[in-house]
Amino acid sequence: MPRVTVVKAVQETSFYGAVVFFVVLAAFPFYWMLITSFKTNADLYNVTNVPFWFNDPPTLEHFRYLFEKTLFVTWLLNSLIIGLVVTAITLVTALPAAYSLARMTGRNGEALGIGIFLTYLVPPTLLFLPLSRVIAVLGLQNSMWSLVLVYPTFTIPFCTWLLMGFFKSMPREIEEAAIVDGCSLFGAFFKMAIPLSVPGILTVVIFTFTLTLQEFVYALTFVSASDQKPITLGVATDLIRGDVFYWGEIMAGALIASIPVAVAYNLFLDRFISGITGGAVK
Amino acid sequence: MPQDVIDAATVDGAGFWRRNYQIIVPMILPIVAVGLVFGIVFTFTDLSIVFLMTNGGPVGATSVLGFAGFQTGITSGDVSHGAAISLFMLPVLLVIVVVMLRFIRRREI
Protein backbone atom coordinates (compact mmCIF):
# COMPACT_ATOMS: atom_id res chain seq x y z
CA MET A 1 0.00 0.00 0.00
CA PRO A 2 2.69 2.61 0.90
CA ARG A 3 4.53 1.67 -2.29
CA VAL A 4 1.47 2.60 -4.31
CA THR A 5 1.19 5.96 -2.55
CA VAL A 6 4.85 6.68 -3.23
CA VAL A 7 4.41 5.87 -6.94
CA LYS A 8 1.32 8.05 -7.04
CA ALA A 9 3.09 10.91 -5.32
CA VAL A 10 5.99 10.71 -7.80
CA GLN A 11 3.54 10.67 -10.70
CA GLU A 12 1.64 13.67 -9.42
CA THR A 13 4.79 15.63 -8.69
CA SER A 14 6.28 14.99 -12.11
CA PHE A 15 2.97 15.88 -13.78
CA TYR A 16 2.62 19.20 -11.95
CA GLY A 17 6.33 19.83 -12.35
CA ALA A 18 5.95 19.55 -16.12
CA VAL A 19 2.85 21.79 -16.05
CA VAL A 20 4.64 24.44 -14.02
CA PHE A 21 7.65 24.28 -16.35
CA PHE A 22 5.54 24.95 -19.43
CA VAL A 23 3.46 27.64 -17.75
CA VAL A 24 6.61 29.49 -16.74
CA LEU A 25 7.97 29.04 -20.25
CA ALA A 26 4.81 30.52 -21.77
CA ALA A 27 4.25 33.30 -19.27
CA PHE A 28 7.79 34.54 -18.87
CA PRO A 29 7.85 36.81 -21.97
CA PHE A 30 4.69 38.53 -20.71
CA TYR A 31 6.19 38.98 -17.27
CA TRP A 32 9.33 40.38 -18.89
CA MET A 33 7.28 42.84 -20.98
CA LEU A 34 5.27 43.92 -17.96
CA ILE A 35 8.21 44.48 -15.69
CA THR A 36 10.36 46.19 -18.32
CA SER A 37 7.61 48.59 -19.31
CA PHE A 38 7.31 49.87 -15.73
CA LYS A 39 11.02 50.15 -14.93
CA THR A 40 12.89 53.41 -15.00
CA ASN A 41 15.65 53.74 -17.57
CA ALA A 42 18.26 53.99 -14.84
CA ASP A 43 17.06 50.66 -13.49
CA LEU A 44 17.05 49.07 -16.97
CA TYR A 45 20.58 50.06 -17.87
CA ASN A 46 22.27 49.27 -14.57
CA VAL A 47 23.82 45.85 -15.15
CA THR A 48 24.48 45.22 -11.47
CA ASN A 49 20.74 45.30 -10.64
CA VAL A 50 18.67 42.14 -10.32
CA PRO A 51 16.84 42.09 -13.66
CA PHE A 52 13.79 40.13 -12.49
CA TRP A 53 12.34 42.69 -10.11
CA PHE A 54 12.12 46.46 -9.55
CA ASN A 55 15.25 47.99 -8.03
CA ASP A 56 13.91 51.51 -8.38
CA PRO A 57 10.22 52.29 -7.83
CA PRO A 58 8.06 51.56 -10.90
CA THR A 59 7.27 54.41 -13.26
CA LEU A 60 4.73 55.30 -15.93
CA GLU A 61 7.12 57.43 -17.98
CA HIS A 62 7.36 54.87 -20.80
CA PHE A 63 3.60 54.77 -21.24
CA ARG A 64 3.40 58.54 -21.13
CA TYR A 65 6.12 58.83 -23.75
CA LEU A 66 4.42 56.20 -25.89
CA PHE A 67 1.06 57.96 -25.91
CA GLU A 68 2.22 61.56 -26.03
CA LYS A 69 5.41 61.62 -28.06
CA THR A 70 4.94 58.83 -30.59
CA LEU A 71 2.25 57.85 -33.09
CA PHE A 72 1.32 54.85 -30.99
CA VAL A 73 -2.42 55.61 -30.94
CA THR A 74 -2.41 55.96 -34.73
CA TRP A 75 -0.66 52.60 -35.10
CA LEU A 76 -3.16 50.99 -32.78
CA LEU A 77 -6.05 52.44 -34.79
CA ASN A 78 -4.43 51.42 -38.09
CA SER A 79 -4.06 47.84 -36.85
CA LEU A 80 -7.66 47.84 -35.68
CA ILE A 81 -9.03 49.18 -38.97
CA ILE A 82 -6.91 46.78 -41.03
CA GLY A 83 -7.97 43.89 -38.81
CA LEU A 84 -11.68 44.69 -39.03
CA VAL A 85 -11.75 45.27 -42.79
CA VAL A 86 -9.67 42.17 -43.52
CA THR A 87 -11.88 40.08 -41.24
CA ALA A 88 -14.98 41.33 -43.07
CA ILE A 89 -13.47 40.60 -46.50
CA THR A 90 -12.37 37.16 -45.34
CA LEU A 91 -15.79 36.23 -43.98
CA VAL A 92 -17.64 37.44 -47.08
CA THR A 93 -15.43 35.33 -49.37
CA ALA A 94 -14.47 32.36 -47.22
CA LEU A 95 -17.96 31.45 -45.97
CA PRO A 96 -19.57 30.78 -49.38
CA ALA A 97 -16.33 29.25 -50.68
CA ALA A 98 -16.06 26.85 -47.77
CA TYR A 99 -19.75 25.96 -47.90
CA SER A 100 -19.73 25.15 -51.59
CA LEU A 101 -16.49 23.19 -51.27
CA ALA A 102 -17.89 21.18 -48.40
CA ARG A 103 -21.35 20.49 -49.81
CA MET A 104 -21.71 21.01 -53.52
CA THR A 105 -18.66 19.50 -55.17
CA GLY A 106 -17.63 15.89 -55.38
CA ARG A 107 -14.08 14.67 -55.83
CA ASN A 108 -13.08 17.85 -57.68
CA GLY A 109 -13.99 19.83 -54.60
CA GLU A 110 -11.68 17.67 -52.55
CA ALA A 111 -8.79 18.42 -54.91
CA LEU A 112 -9.71 22.11 -54.96
CA GLY A 113 -9.72 22.16 -51.15
CA ILE A 114 -6.24 20.66 -51.05
CA GLY A 115 -5.19 23.23 -53.66
CA ILE A 116 -6.42 26.06 -51.44
CA PHE A 117 -4.56 24.54 -48.53
CA LEU A 118 -1.39 24.45 -50.62
CA THR A 119 -1.72 28.16 -51.48
CA TYR A 120 -1.49 28.85 -47.81
CA LEU A 121 1.75 26.91 -47.77
CA VAL A 122 3.39 29.44 -50.11
CA PRO A 123 4.91 31.77 -47.54
CA PRO A 124 4.83 35.60 -47.58
CA THR A 125 8.59 35.63 -48.00
CA LEU A 126 8.17 34.26 -51.51
CA LEU A 127 5.26 36.52 -52.34
CA PHE A 128 6.23 39.96 -51.14
CA LEU A 129 8.40 40.79 -54.14
CA PRO A 130 5.78 40.07 -56.83
CA LEU A 131 3.09 41.65 -54.67
CA SER A 132 5.16 44.79 -54.15
CA ARG A 133 5.02 45.23 -57.93
CA VAL A 134 1.23 44.86 -57.87
CA ILE A 135 0.99 47.39 -55.05
CA ALA A 136 3.18 49.80 -57.00
CA VAL A 137 1.02 49.47 -60.12
CA LEU A 138 -2.10 50.16 -58.05
CA GLY A 139 -0.45 53.22 -56.51
CA LEU A 140 -0.91 51.97 -52.96
CA GLN A 141 2.70 52.16 -51.78
CA ASN A 142 3.08 53.60 -48.32
CA SER A 143 -0.58 53.24 -47.51
CA MET A 144 -2.19 50.93 -44.99
CA TRP A 145 -4.81 50.05 -47.61
CA SER A 146 -2.17 48.05 -49.45
CA LEU A 147 -2.16 45.77 -46.39
CA VAL A 148 -5.95 45.53 -46.46
CA LEU A 149 -5.60 44.32 -50.04
CA VAL A 150 -2.73 41.91 -49.39
CA TYR A 151 -3.66 40.28 -46.06
CA PRO A 152 -6.65 38.36 -47.46
CA THR A 153 -4.19 36.41 -49.63
CA PHE A 154 -3.23 34.38 -46.60
CA THR A 155 -6.34 34.70 -44.43
CA ILE A 156 -8.82 33.52 -47.06
CA PRO A 157 -7.13 30.16 -47.85
CA PHE A 158 -6.62 29.44 -44.17
CA CYS A 159 -10.17 30.35 -43.16
CA THR A 160 -11.74 28.58 -46.13
CA TRP A 161 -9.91 25.46 -45.08
CA LEU A 162 -10.98 25.86 -41.47
CA LEU A 163 -14.63 26.52 -42.30
CA MET A 164 -14.68 23.69 -44.82
CA GLY A 165 -13.81 21.25 -42.09
CA PHE A 166 -16.44 22.82 -39.89
CA PHE A 167 -19.20 22.61 -42.51
CA LYS A 168 -18.25 19.00 -43.25
CA SER A 169 -18.67 18.05 -39.62
CA MET A 170 -22.14 19.61 -39.52
CA PRO A 171 -25.02 17.23 -40.21
CA ARG A 172 -26.28 17.65 -43.75
CA GLU A 173 -29.82 16.67 -42.69
CA ILE A 174 -30.59 20.07 -41.19
CA GLU A 175 -30.16 21.88 -44.48
CA GLU A 176 -31.89 19.12 -46.38
CA ALA A 177 -34.88 19.46 -44.05
CA ALA A 178 -34.90 23.21 -44.65
CA ILE A 179 -34.83 22.72 -48.42
CA VAL A 180 -37.63 20.15 -48.23
CA ASP A 181 -39.64 22.65 -46.20
CA GLY A 182 -39.36 25.17 -49.04
CA CYS A 183 -36.09 27.00 -48.46
CA SER A 184 -33.94 27.83 -51.46
CA LEU A 185 -30.31 26.76 -51.45
CA PHE A 186 -29.29 30.28 -50.42
CA GLY A 187 -31.99 30.31 -47.79
CA ALA A 188 -30.66 27.08 -46.35
CA PHE A 189 -27.16 28.53 -46.35
CA PHE A 190 -28.12 31.83 -44.72
CA LYS A 191 -30.79 30.63 -42.32
CA MET A 192 -29.46 27.22 -41.33
CA ALA A 193 -25.77 26.78 -42.06
CA ILE A 194 -24.55 30.21 -40.93
CA PRO A 195 -26.40 30.41 -37.60
CA LEU A 196 -25.31 26.86 -36.80
CA SER A 197 -21.69 27.58 -37.60
CA VAL A 198 -21.35 30.59 -35.31
CA PRO A 199 -18.64 28.84 -33.25
CA GLY A 200 -16.67 28.20 -36.45
CA ILE A 201 -17.19 31.75 -37.68
CA LEU A 202 -16.05 33.11 -34.35
CA THR A 203 -12.93 30.97 -34.49
CA VAL A 204 -12.25 32.30 -37.97
CA VAL A 205 -12.79 35.89 -36.84
CA ILE A 206 -10.34 35.50 -33.98
CA PHE A 207 -7.78 33.72 -36.16
CA THR A 208 -8.02 36.29 -38.92
CA PHE A 209 -7.75 39.14 -36.50
CA THR A 210 -4.70 37.67 -34.79
CA LEU A 211 -3.02 36.76 -38.07
CA THR A 212 -3.42 40.31 -39.39
CA LEU A 213 -2.40 41.82 -36.07
CA GLN A 214 0.85 39.89 -35.92
CA GLU A 215 1.77 40.06 -39.61
CA PHE A 216 5.12 41.70 -40.14
CA VAL A 217 6.72 40.88 -43.49
CA TYR A 218 4.17 42.55 -45.77
CA ALA A 219 3.88 45.59 -43.53
CA LEU A 220 7.65 45.96 -43.49
CA THR A 221 7.82 45.71 -47.26
CA PHE A 222 4.92 47.92 -48.30
CA VAL A 223 4.64 50.63 -45.66
CA SER A 224 7.30 53.06 -44.57
CA ALA A 225 5.32 56.21 -43.70
CA SER A 226 5.10 56.41 -39.93
CA ASP A 227 1.43 57.38 -39.73
CA GLN A 228 0.37 54.45 -41.93
CA LYS A 229 2.13 51.72 -39.99
CA PRO A 230 0.29 48.98 -38.13
CA ILE A 231 1.31 48.43 -34.54
CA THR A 232 3.74 45.53 -35.08
CA LEU A 233 5.79 47.55 -37.52
CA GLY A 234 5.51 50.84 -35.66
CA VAL A 235 6.72 49.41 -32.38
CA ALA A 236 9.54 47.44 -33.99
CA THR A 237 10.88 50.12 -36.31
CA ASP A 238 9.99 53.55 -34.97
CA LEU A 239 11.01 52.86 -31.40
CA ILE A 240 14.50 51.76 -32.42
CA ARG A 241 16.36 54.83 -33.59
CA GLY A 242 19.76 54.00 -34.92
CA ASP A 243 21.43 52.09 -32.16
CA VAL A 244 19.14 53.34 -29.40
CA PHE A 245 16.47 50.87 -28.31
CA TYR A 246 13.60 52.47 -26.40
CA TRP A 247 13.17 49.26 -24.41
CA GLY A 248 10.53 50.51 -21.99
CA GLU A 249 8.39 51.91 -24.80
CA ILE A 250 8.85 48.82 -26.97
CA MET A 251 7.76 46.54 -24.15
CA ALA A 252 4.82 48.79 -23.23
CA GLY A 253 3.65 48.86 -26.84
CA ALA A 254 3.99 45.10 -27.22
CA LEU A 255 2.14 44.57 -23.98
CA ILE A 256 -0.78 46.81 -24.96
CA ALA A 257 -1.01 45.11 -28.35
CA SER A 258 -0.93 41.58 -26.98
CA ILE A 259 -3.40 41.94 -24.10
CA PRO A 260 -6.60 42.16 -26.21
CA VAL A 261 -5.55 39.11 -28.23
CA ALA A 262 -4.80 37.06 -25.15
CA VAL A 263 -8.12 38.04 -23.56
CA ALA A 264 -10.05 37.27 -26.75
CA TYR A 265 -8.47 33.84 -26.99
CA ASN A 266 -9.19 32.94 -23.41
CA LEU A 267 -12.74 34.27 -23.26
CA PHE A 268 -14.15 33.22 -26.58
CA LEU A 269 -12.51 30.07 -27.83
CA ASP A 270 -13.41 27.76 -24.97
CA ARG A 271 -16.94 29.03 -24.68
CA PHE A 272 -17.95 28.88 -28.32
CA ILE A 273 -16.08 25.87 -29.66
CA SER A 274 -18.17 23.39 -27.73
CA GLY A 275 -20.57 21.67 -30.06
CA ILE A 276 -23.80 23.51 -30.65
CA THR A 277 -24.95 20.92 -33.17
CA GLY A 278 -24.43 18.17 -30.61
CA GLY A 279 -28.02 16.95 -30.37
CA ALA A 280 -29.47 18.56 -33.50
CA VAL A 281 -30.42 15.39 -35.34
CA LYS A 282 -32.43 12.89 -33.41
CA MET B 1 -9.01 10.82 -31.71
CA PRO B 2 -11.71 8.39 -30.57
CA GLN B 3 -11.71 7.80 -26.83
CA ASP B 4 -12.79 4.16 -27.15
CA VAL B 5 -9.52 3.21 -28.87
CA ILE B 6 -7.61 4.56 -25.89
CA ASP B 7 -10.01 2.80 -23.53
CA ALA B 8 -9.57 -0.49 -25.39
CA ALA B 9 -5.79 -0.17 -25.14
CA THR B 10 -6.08 0.54 -21.41
CA VAL B 11 -8.30 -2.50 -20.90
CA ASP B 12 -5.76 -4.63 -22.78
CA GLY B 13 -3.14 -3.54 -20.27
CA ALA B 14 -1.25 -0.84 -22.11
CA GLY B 15 0.45 1.66 -19.83
CA PHE B 16 0.80 5.39 -20.34
CA TRP B 17 3.92 5.27 -22.51
CA ARG B 18 2.75 2.35 -24.62
CA ARG B 19 -0.60 4.07 -25.21
CA ASN B 20 1.20 7.25 -26.16
CA TYR B 21 3.78 5.87 -28.55
CA GLN B 22 2.11 2.78 -30.02
CA ILE B 23 -1.52 3.90 -30.24
CA ILE B 24 -1.91 7.68 -30.16
CA VAL B 25 1.18 8.82 -32.05
CA PRO B 26 0.69 6.48 -35.04
CA MET B 27 -2.94 7.57 -35.28
CA ILE B 28 -2.25 11.29 -35.27
CA LEU B 29 0.83 10.99 -37.48
CA PRO B 30 -0.82 12.57 -40.57
CA ILE B 31 -1.76 15.66 -38.55
CA VAL B 32 1.69 15.77 -37.01
CA ALA B 33 3.15 15.61 -40.52
CA VAL B 34 0.97 18.55 -41.62
CA GLY B 35 2.15 20.52 -38.61
CA LEU B 36 5.71 19.58 -39.45
CA VAL B 37 5.31 20.80 -43.05
CA PHE B 38 4.02 24.12 -41.80
CA GLY B 39 6.81 24.40 -39.27
CA ILE B 40 9.51 23.66 -41.83
CA VAL B 41 8.10 25.99 -44.49
CA PHE B 42 7.55 28.94 -42.21
CA THR B 43 10.81 28.57 -40.35
CA PHE B 44 12.76 28.14 -43.56
CA THR B 45 11.34 31.32 -45.06
CA ASP B 46 11.03 33.46 -41.95
CA LEU B 47 12.66 36.83 -42.13
CA SER B 48 10.97 38.90 -39.43
CA ILE B 49 12.91 37.26 -36.58
CA VAL B 50 16.20 37.84 -38.39
CA PHE B 51 15.21 41.43 -39.16
CA LEU B 52 14.23 42.16 -35.58
CA MET B 53 16.99 40.36 -33.72
CA THR B 54 20.18 40.81 -35.70
CA ASN B 55 19.36 42.54 -39.00
CA GLY B 56 21.46 39.87 -40.69
CA GLY B 57 24.63 41.03 -39.02
CA PRO B 58 27.47 40.85 -38.16
CA VAL B 59 28.47 41.00 -41.85
CA GLY B 60 25.69 38.67 -42.96
CA ALA B 61 26.60 35.93 -40.47
CA THR B 62 22.98 35.46 -39.36
CA SER B 63 21.26 36.22 -42.65
CA VAL B 64 18.96 33.67 -44.26
CA LEU B 65 17.70 33.36 -47.83
CA GLY B 66 14.43 35.13 -47.11
CA PHE B 67 16.13 38.02 -45.43
CA ALA B 68 18.76 38.25 -48.17
CA GLY B 69 15.94 38.46 -50.70
CA PHE B 70 14.31 41.23 -48.71
CA GLN B 71 17.53 43.17 -48.37
CA THR B 72 18.46 43.07 -52.05
CA GLY B 73 14.90 43.32 -53.35
CA ILE B 74 13.33 45.99 -51.14
CA THR B 75 16.04 47.76 -49.14
CA SER B 76 18.50 48.05 -52.05
CA GLY B 77 15.75 48.25 -54.65
CA ASP B 78 17.09 45.54 -56.96
CA VAL B 79 13.78 43.72 -57.29
CA SER B 80 14.81 41.17 -59.91
CA HIS B 81 17.90 40.10 -57.98
CA GLY B 82 15.84 39.79 -54.81
CA ALA B 83 13.19 37.79 -56.63
CA ALA B 84 15.88 35.40 -57.86
CA ILE B 85 17.06 34.84 -54.29
CA SER B 86 13.52 34.29 -53.03
CA LEU B 87 12.60 32.00 -55.90
CA PHE B 88 15.59 29.83 -55.12
CA MET B 89 13.77 28.66 -51.99
CA LEU B 90 10.83 27.34 -53.96
CA PRO B 91 12.36 24.10 -55.36
CA VAL B 92 13.82 23.22 -51.97
CA LEU B 93 10.45 23.69 -50.27
CA LEU B 94 8.63 21.90 -53.06
CA VAL B 95 10.72 18.75 -52.57
CA ILE B 96 10.06 18.77 -48.82
CA VAL B 97 6.33 19.37 -49.22
CA VAL B 98 5.89 16.72 -51.93
CA VAL B 99 7.76 14.11 -49.89
CA MET B 100 5.70 14.92 -46.80
CA LEU B 101 2.38 14.88 -48.66
CA ARG B 102 3.18 11.51 -50.23
CA PHE B 103 4.00 10.20 -46.78
CA ILE B 104 0.68 11.49 -45.42
CA ARG B 105 -1.28 9.99 -48.29
CA ARG B 106 0.36 6.60 -47.81
CA ARG B 107 -0.50 6.64 -44.12
CA GLU B 108 -4.13 7.51 -44.78
CA ILE B 109 -4.70 4.66 -47.24
Image (cartoon, coloured by chain):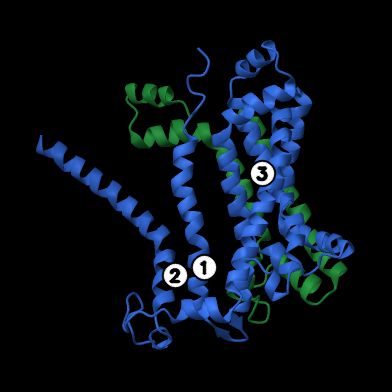
Dot placed on the residue nearer the N-terminal end, 2 or 3: 2
Q: Chain of mark 1?
A: A
Q: Nearer the viewer, residue B34 or A257?
A: A257
Query: What residue type is disc 1 on?
Result: Ala
Q: Residues within 10 Å of mark 1 (few under 14, many from 20)?
A: some
Circle 1/circle 3 CB separation < 8 Å: no
Dot placed on the residue nearer the N-terminal end, 1 or 3: 3
Q: Is residue A65 left or right of residue A159?
A: left
Q: Residues within 10 Å of mark 2 (few under 14, many from 20)?
A: many
Q: Which mark is residue A73?
A: none
Decide if residue A25 is in sight here.
yes
Q: Residue furthest right?
A: A137
**Badge count:** 3
Query: What residue type is disc 2 on?
Result: Met
**Residue pictured at 34% horizontal, 56% vertical:** A21
Among the chains pictured, the one given blue colouring is A
Asked if both marks, 2 and 3, belong to the same chain, the answer given is yes
Q: Which mark is residue A158?
A: 3
Marks 2/3: CA–CA distance: 30 Å
Circle 1/circle 2 CB separation < 8 Å: yes
Location of the N terminus of chain A (image quadrant): top left
Circle 2/circle 3 CB separation < 8 Å: no
Query: What residue type is disc 3 on?
Result: Phe
Dot placed on the residue nearer the N-terminal end, 1 or 2: 2
Residue linked to disc 2: A33
Q: Is residue A196 left or right of residue A26?
A: right
Residue linked to disc 1: A254
Among the chains pictured, the one given green colouring is B
Residue B72, how many percent across, how many down?
79, 73
